[in-house]
Each structure stands twice: as C-alpha cells, then as structure tokens.
Image (tube, helix red, strand yellow):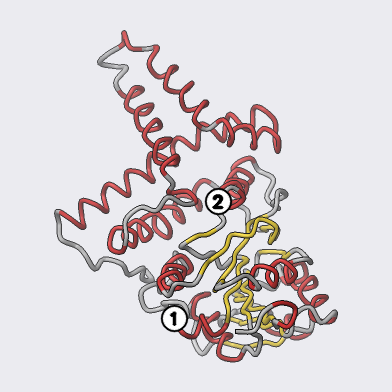
Amino acid sequence: MSSGPSLTISVIMPAYNAEQLLPRVLPPLIDMLNAGQVQQVLVVDDQSPDGTAALAEQMGATVLTTPVNGGPGAARNLAAEQATGDILWFVDSDVIAWPDGPEHIRRAMSEDNVGAVFGSYDATPDGQAWFSRYKNLLHRYHHQRARREARTFWAGCGAIRRDVFCEVGGFDVRTYEVPSIEDIELGYRIANTGRRILVEPQLQGKHLKVWTIRNSLSTDIYCRALPWARLMISREGLSDDLNTSMAERTRAGIAGLLLLSILALPIWPGAWSLPFLLLAAALIANFDLVRTMAGHGGPWFAFKCLLYHQVYYVYSATIYVWCLFEYHVLGQKNNLRVTRN
C-alpha cells in the first residue's frame, strides 16, 4: 500500500434531489480539486428528477448517473468502480466538508494498517430549531469522544482505501435497499480483515439537514436502531464504542427506571420523590452531555435535550430488547434486510 503525501483521493458524493444543496456543498470540494488536494470529485446522481446532475457538472464535478434509483450505497459503489484515487472519501450531499479534510485523511491513512477513517459533524449545524441542533450536536458529541479505534464506519464524512473497499465488496445494497446502517455494516467487514478504522475528530463537516421529532423517530427506529440491533445480535453483540458503550447502557437503564417511576405514580403516589431522584441521577450520569449542550445553547436548551435524551434511551433500549426476543425466542435469525416500502 502507498502511504503519506503520495496518497491520492477521490471524493465521492451520492446525490438525490440535491440541486438546492450543491451550491453550498460542492465549492469546497472543487477548490480542493483545483488546488490538487484531491484527484477527483465524483457526484453520483441517483436518478434525481431535479437538476442535480446538470448543476454538478456545471460546477466542475465529474458526474455519474445510476441506472436506477438505488440509494446512496449503490451510488457509492458505482463511483468506486470509476474512482482512480488510492482513497475513496465519501461526503454526503448535505455535508459541507472542511477544507483541511485531505490533510487529516492522509495523516490517518499513513499510520500502520489503517483501512478507513471517519470524522464528525462540526459544532455549528445548519438547522437552528432546538431539536435539530440537539440531533446534530449529539452525533458530534459521540464521535468527538469515541475511542480512536472503531469497528464501525460512517459514510457521511469518511474515507476508505480503495483496495480495501474492493476487497470487502463495497456497500451491501442487497441487504440495505434504503439508506440505513450500510456504512456501519461495511465497517464490521473492514475490521474483520484485521485493518484498523480510526475516528479522527478533526475531520469535520457541517450538516445541513434539519431534523424534526417526526423524521428523527422514523430514522432512529426503522433505519438505525432496528437494523443495527439485529446486526449486532447476529454478529458479535454489543460493542463498547460510540453510543453502544457500557456507559451509554448504564444511562439507558437510568432512563428506563425514570419512565417506570413516572408510570407508577398513579398507583403508588407516595413515591412522588422517586422520579425527581432518578432525574437527578440522569443529570449526573449525562452531565458531560448537558454541559456540552449548555455551551451551545444555554441551560434551557440543555434541559430540553436532557429530557428528550431519556426518551431516546428508552426506545433504543426497548428496540434492542425486542430484537433479542425475536432472535432467541422467535428464532428470526436472518431478519437483517431493510427494504423499500
């Protein structure tokens, strides 16, 4: 494998109905291309009905088009076949990559036996509603504090050696027909080859997606929690990493007890102090998160984030328990596919 400054980088951006996003996300990448920091900027139009392909080409990107609408995994696989760089740098069409990305990627890839590296969102997400900020900052929070070596991968702003990507067969678009955890599953396969996957906190991008509670619940439950829980149970169980760490599991337990204490109040009114004690325990257990959120939006913002975060813990843990039940009791051991409705 080549290493150091000689490593060339092909940027790959899957895009669907991204015409309104391209004027913000493409210029930094085209600047890198013109400066010789990256070798290619490949935009893969996934059969968009808008002007995504025409605008991307006009702005200086090399444009590919998928034969059918197949989702970002299929788009990335198609681009990987045409890429000429040593490294495939995946950047989502709603992420503005920071200009120093190539530097951090090359430095990480120059380390011994590194097959992939990924970063995080920056501290100033686009959506300013409290919930949207909470979601994007929570993603950043976990990635900024993760162990340096991971067993998963994140394709929002992450890079893989092209030879490693080809060796493991790219994204599994048969199991994951819609965007879900195809990048996480790819990370498992890379790690199983013995290559290292690094988390690089300085490799960052600004997320332009605006979250609502409704679209967050749908994504979290059907596209993340359910398929990820099934994957972990069928492969290797819970890992002590990112938002599945032992500390996170403890916090989820506190959130569950908090909910149960509230539900018990109608039949056990004398225990009115218990929810307050458990909320205080949740505050202590999540103090670093609360302090981080307060630094971005003040105490009231942090308190709202803490309360919703307990809801997040409850439904995430409930889904994991359900997946254990369907795997061990119902015998549904091959229920991994995420299909189009």
Q: Residue at x 67, y 87 (%)?
A: 63
Q: Residue at x 58, y 79 (%)?
A: 161
Closer to the camera, 316 or 36? 36
Which x, y percent locates residue 84? 65, 90
Q: Is residue 221 above or below residue 250?
A: below
Label 1 SS: helix
Residue at the far front: name it.
112
Residue at the far top: name it.
270
Residue type of the residue flagged with mark 1: Val
Q: Is residue 94 above or below residue 6?
A: above
Q: Quadrant of residue 25?
A: bottom right
**Disc ID at residue 146:** 2
Which x, y percent locates residue 274? 38, 16
User: Position of 236 compared to 2: left or right?
Assistant: left
Q: Is residue 123 above or below residue 327?
A: above
Quadrant occupied by the C terminus: bottom left
The answer for how far apart the CA atoms under marks 2 and 1 are is 24 Å
Task: Characterize the local packing of mark 2: few (<14), some (14-19) or many (20 or more) Cα atoms within 10 angstroms.
Answer: some
Q: Residue at x 26, y 66 (%)?
A: 335
Label 2 SS: loop
Residue type of the residue flagged with mark 2: Ala
Closer to the camera, 127 or 197? 197
